[in-house]
Image (tube, rainbow, N blue to C red):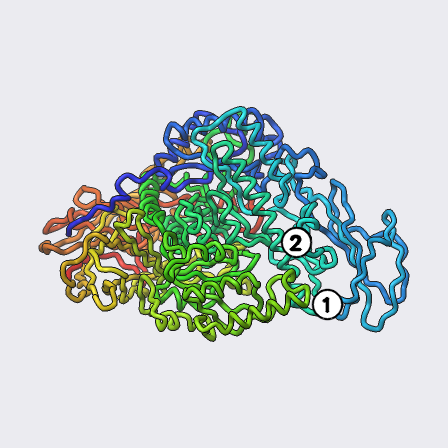
């Protein structure tokens, strides 16, 4: 079989490599060990590191010279910067000590840059009664800072939680000092509900209580960040530093607010927010807010007011915070990488435009739909990277295997991501400074300091085979080289929302049960703001032809829509761009600002009716009808699938136009099931159905294997690209000149990613004959011996992973069958290390032109294969197979397989008693064994 070269795989740049989040115990490290570990990370295949200090430090260290931000800390950063520069690695530094973002430049809770919140109190008042007394304090009381009165008001309460709009009373003028004096009118319509609102500092701190969290909605909060970084860059200019990193928005407030919000709101929306304070806020945020939760008797109106509130928050967050940070970073020759918007009441699709590198994360967010929310902004603004914090899970530290990691990575590619920062790795060296215990941070033991303890995965710098880790990172790097090419996306799907908590089953945002994806259509989400920009790039029925080149706009059912969005639909339809709208027409304007007068409301109704009747607007009853509507409109996908198997697609185009890359991923459906939590997981990792999400999901193997019909748009030579080996070979596709597609039957199984490359400059001279599925002949393999070597510290009492290795006494086991190590001998229950299997396969002859593939059933964790004393290509660590054709000969062939475990069974039992939340210990199986759908075999493939 002839192997072809994939040009972008020849010498990939370092910025194509995955990076690692590197957790440091402040400055309680040793310089030599720090340099040694960074070199080890380089050898393991990482292209960069991001340094973060976590709160999980003793106050003795945090408040000492080894704390964050000290002179010693700056020295540690300089050591890391020097070593990463020497190795050609990138360095990112967290925006403050851990997260949420905080700054030592904020002196006290009342400082203008400090985090602010709105809190309230409510009292039921009987009609006709008089209130004369002190105002009730807010529901949330902080230990610092000054609470300021925002407003006092009252509404008649029609029924619990429902207020009469026309009954609004502004009682602020009746407050003297802190005393309200007011006689409430008689009424038979209900009881009065008194509201008191206060603006106050939220008083959230990091760095052992020494740094205040910033206001994320004001210029002053951004300026506080800038003050710290200015002092930092005055002391050093790290050449290797690329980005300032901002983690997920986990600031804690009773209700999102900033000191100037009333003025900002009225300036932007054209009316006062104050009378509507009882109706604002969102409950499903993290951390949770204390939302009033009332609504008007006209619920549409209070919902529209709340959207005006969230739109204003989004604008302040984008303009003052995100844009301000990026401008600040660019002033120092750096960029910002940021996990924008989610967890908070902001529009994530728009927010992703502002940082140079937007980032999404895995923890609790496995649905591909949620991972797609930033992709359109990346493609619109021609950003090179859409980063992925990959692949945190609760309670699985040291237990994540590489199959687990690749599950997250492959799904992220289908969401448009193309860069990873692995979560994470802890400093693994010694600490012999003040307060150390046996050469370690107090309270830590072998294999060393762990940033999250055993609470959150993982420590990817403590996998037991650096060589295998390097090979896996090489594989991800090759895939990144493809997915960093220009994305071509079939469908833009409108999404008008301000929350993104990440919790939901597969296809939770575009709820069509996967019908669109399974027919081959790729899609991502656009908001009104993004669509407005895209509309300026409309050419010949294509949105943004030099970018994602969307071929249609899909609008799911909308109960409300803005006048701006209606205007965009009108423009696109009149320009003959395909727009499909599902469901009945909207009934209410999206924003109250466009319906708060009769004239505005009539104008919106007129525009809605005009748009709804446009002859070019395609209507369908439900989103499930969209695929057929697209085909009737003669808009087939770039990758045609018959829809009989759960398969997602992605298309990438090289910038020079020579090659198109097509990706097929056979996905499994994750299921959100908080009512039936997974007893083997913790926190947000537990709210998904067991067996549907990592780490309880296991690839089913042969039962899911299926031949499917695939058609790729174009007529050219098609190569199948193997990122594990870096090789490619020609696939047999048949070109149909009528449809313009090249077709083949492709065998794929669940959790398998297949990559094709179409050479646009090399057309087939004649149609290839009908593709014939391969025939397989199997040969039995017999493993008779297993040599086990345990992974241990180099001496008793050593606490550093850096001074550990395969020092245990080798154990030889004669094999009668293949079973996990811990089931071969009860003494191996907590064994961690590597095992070498010895076996053989007999071949009477070798058939010319055939491929011989070794498949190893179940393997955990990583493995390498040697045939007749020569090493094979690095195997596929997910499908557990490798082509060994060049190493075989007729007769008996010696097979040796080296399997390396992770540390979970060895380390977890010693840690679980110290967890801050209950963690379940589920022993892992290591070694080689067989299951119903995954057998050990050598098979011959021929046409």
Count of numbered tags: 2
The answer to which of 780 and 627 lies nearer the viewer is 627
Residue at 21% across / 54% down in the picture? 853
Query: Which label sits on residue 661?
Result: none
**x then y, percent, for residue 683:** 55, 54
Q: Which of marks 1 and 2 is nearer the N terminus?
A: 1
Query: At numbered mark 2, what does the secondary structure look like: helix, strand or loop?
Result: loop
Quadrant for residue 294, please give it: bottom right
- Residue sitting farthest toward the bottom: 621
Q: How crowded is mark 1: few (under 14 residues within 10 Å), some or many (20 or more)?
A: some
- Does 298 appear above or below 480? below
The answer to which of 498 and 937 lies nearer the viewer is 498
**x then y, percent, for residue 690:** 46, 61
Query: At numbered mark 1, what does the secondary structure look like: helix, strand or loop?
Result: strand
Q: In this view, does 247 lie to the left or right of 60?
A: left
Q: Do the residues labelled 1 and 2 touch (CB within 8 Å)?
A: no
Asked if residue 905 can be seen in this view, the reply is no
- Does 236 appear above or below 323? above
Q: How crowded is mark 2: few (under 14 residues within 10 Å), some or many (20 or more)?
A: many
Figure quadrant of the C terminus: bottom left
Residue wearing tag 2: 289
Instruction: Report how far apart the C-alphas of labels 1 and 2 lie in the structure.
Output: 20 Å
Residue at 17% across / 47% down in the picture? 894
The answer to which of 378 and 888 lies nearer the viewer is 378
**x then y, percent, for residue 56:** 57, 39
Residue wearing tag 1: 162
**x then y, percent, for residue 796:** 44, 31
Asked if residue 731 can be seen in this view, the reply is yes
- Does 337 appear above or below 933? above
Q: Nearer the viewer, mark 1 or mark 2?
A: 1
């Amino acid at each position: 079989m002839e192997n072809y070269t994939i040009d972008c795989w020849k010498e990939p740049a370092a910025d194509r490599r995955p990076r690692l989040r590197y957790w440091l115990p402040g400055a309680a490290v040793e310089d030599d060990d720090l340099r040694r570990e960074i070199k080890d990370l380089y050898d393991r295949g990482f292209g960069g590191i991001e340094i973060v200090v976590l709160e999980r430090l003793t106050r003795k260290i945090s408040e000492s010279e080894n704390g964050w931000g000290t002179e010693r800390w700056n020295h540690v950063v300089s050591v890391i910067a020097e070593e990463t520069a020497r190795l050609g690695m990138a360095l990112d530094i967290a925006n403050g000590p851990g997260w949420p973002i905080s700054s030592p430049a904020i002196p006290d809770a009342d400082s203008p840059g400090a985090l602010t919140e709105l809190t309230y109190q409510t009292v039921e008042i009987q009609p006709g009664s008089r209130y004369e007394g002190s105002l009730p304090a807010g529901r949330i009381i902080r230990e610092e800072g000054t609470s300021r009165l925002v407003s006092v008001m009252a509404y008649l309460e029609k029924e619990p939680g429902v207020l009469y709009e026309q009954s609004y009373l502004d009682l602020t003028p009746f407050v003297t000092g802190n005393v309200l004096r007011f006689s409430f009118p008689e009424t038979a319509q209900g009881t009065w509900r008194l509201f008191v609102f206060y603006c106050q500092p939220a008083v959230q701190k990091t760095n052992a209580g020494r740094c205040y969290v910033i206001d994320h909605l004001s210029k002053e909060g951004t300026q506080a960040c800038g003050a710290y970084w200015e002092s930092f860059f005055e002391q050093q200019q790290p050449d290797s530093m690329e980005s300032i990193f901002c983690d997920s928005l986990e600031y804690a407030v009773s209700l999102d607010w900033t000191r100037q919000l009333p003025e900002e709101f009225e300036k932007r929306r054209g009316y006062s927010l104050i009378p509507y304070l009882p109706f604002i806020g969102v409950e499903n945020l993290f951390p949770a807010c204390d939302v009033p939760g009332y609504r008007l008797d006209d619920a549409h109106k209070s919902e529209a007011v709340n959207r005006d509130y969230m739109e204003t928050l989004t604008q302040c967050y984008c303009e003052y915070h995100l844009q301000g940070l990026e401008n600040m970073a660019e002033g120092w020759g750096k960029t910002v990488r940021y996990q924008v918007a989610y967890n908070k009441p902001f529009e994530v699709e728009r927010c992703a435009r502002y940082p140079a590198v937007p980032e999404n994360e895995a923890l609790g967010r496995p649905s591909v739909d949620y991972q797609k929310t930033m992709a359109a902004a990346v493609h619109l603004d021609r950003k090179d990277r859409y980063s992925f914090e990959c692949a945190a899970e609760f309670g699985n530290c040291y237990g994540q295997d590489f199959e687990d990691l690749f599950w997250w990575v492959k799904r992220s590619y289908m969401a448009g991501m193309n860069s990873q920062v692995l979560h994470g790795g802890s400093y693994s060296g010694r600490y012999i400074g003040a307060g150390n215990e046996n050469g370690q941070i107090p309270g830590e033991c072998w294999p060393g300091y762990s940033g999250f303890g055993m609470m959150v995965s993982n420590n990817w710098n403590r996998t037991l085979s650096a060589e295998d880790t390097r090979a896996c990172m090489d594989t991800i790097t090759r895939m990144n080289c493809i997915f960093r090419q220009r994305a071509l996306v079939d469908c833009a799907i409108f999404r008008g929302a301000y929350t993104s908590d990440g919790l939901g089953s597969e296809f939770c945002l575009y709820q069509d049960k996967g019908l669109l994806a399974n027919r081959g259509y790729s899609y991502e989400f656009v908001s009104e703001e993004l669509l407005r920009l895209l509309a300026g790039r409309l050419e010949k029925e294509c949105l943004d032809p030099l970018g994602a080149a969307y071929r249609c706009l899909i609008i799911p059912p909308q109960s409300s829509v803005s006048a701006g969005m209606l205007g965009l639909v009108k423009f696109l339809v009149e320009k003959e761009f395909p727009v499909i709208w599902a469901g009945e027409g909207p009934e209410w304007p999206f924003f109250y600002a466009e319906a708060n007068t009769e004239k505005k409301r009539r104008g919106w109704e007129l525009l809605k009716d005009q748009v709804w009747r446009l002859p070019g607007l395609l209507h369908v009853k439900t989103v499930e009808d969209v695929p057929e509507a697209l085909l009737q409109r003669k808009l087939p996908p770039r990758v045609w699938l018959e829809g009989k198997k759960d398969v997602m697609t992605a298309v990438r185009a090289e910038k020079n136009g020579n090659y198109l890359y097509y990706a097929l991923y056979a996905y499994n459906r994750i299921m959100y099931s908080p009512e039936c939590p997974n007893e083997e997981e913790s926190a947000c990792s537990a709210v998904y159905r067991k067996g549907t999400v990592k780490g309880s999901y296991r690839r089913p193997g042969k039962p899911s294997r299926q031949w499917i019909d695939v058609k790729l748009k174009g007529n050219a030579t098609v190569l199948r690209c193997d990122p594990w080996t870096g090789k490619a070979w020609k696939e047999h596709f048949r070109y149909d000149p009528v449809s313009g597609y090249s077709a083949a039957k492709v065998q794929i199984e669940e959790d398998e990613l297949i990559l094709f490359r179409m050479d646009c400059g090399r057309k087939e001279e004649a149609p290839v004959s009908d593709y014939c599925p391969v025939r397989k002949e199997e040969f039995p393999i017999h493993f008779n011996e297993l040599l086990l070597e345990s992974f241990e510290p180099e001496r008793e009492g050593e606490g550093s992973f850096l001074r550990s290795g395969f020092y245990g006494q080798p154990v030889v086991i004669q094999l009668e069958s293949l079973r996990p190590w811990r089931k071969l001998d009860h003494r191996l229950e907590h064994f961690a290390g590597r095992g070498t299997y010895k076996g053989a396969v007999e071949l009477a002859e070798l058939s010319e032109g055939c491929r011989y593939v070794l498949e190893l059933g179940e393997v955990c964790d990583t493995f390498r294969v040697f045939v007749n004393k020569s090493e094979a290509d690095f195997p596929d660590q997910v499908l557990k197979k490798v082509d060994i054709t060049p190493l075989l000969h007729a007769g008996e062939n010696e097979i040796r397989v080296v399997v390396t475990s992770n540390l979970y069974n060895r380390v977890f039992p010693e840690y679980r008693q110290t967890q801050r939340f209950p963690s379940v210990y589920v022993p892992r199986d290591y070694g080689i064994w067989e299951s119903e759908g995954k057998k050990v075999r050598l098979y011959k493939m021929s046409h």
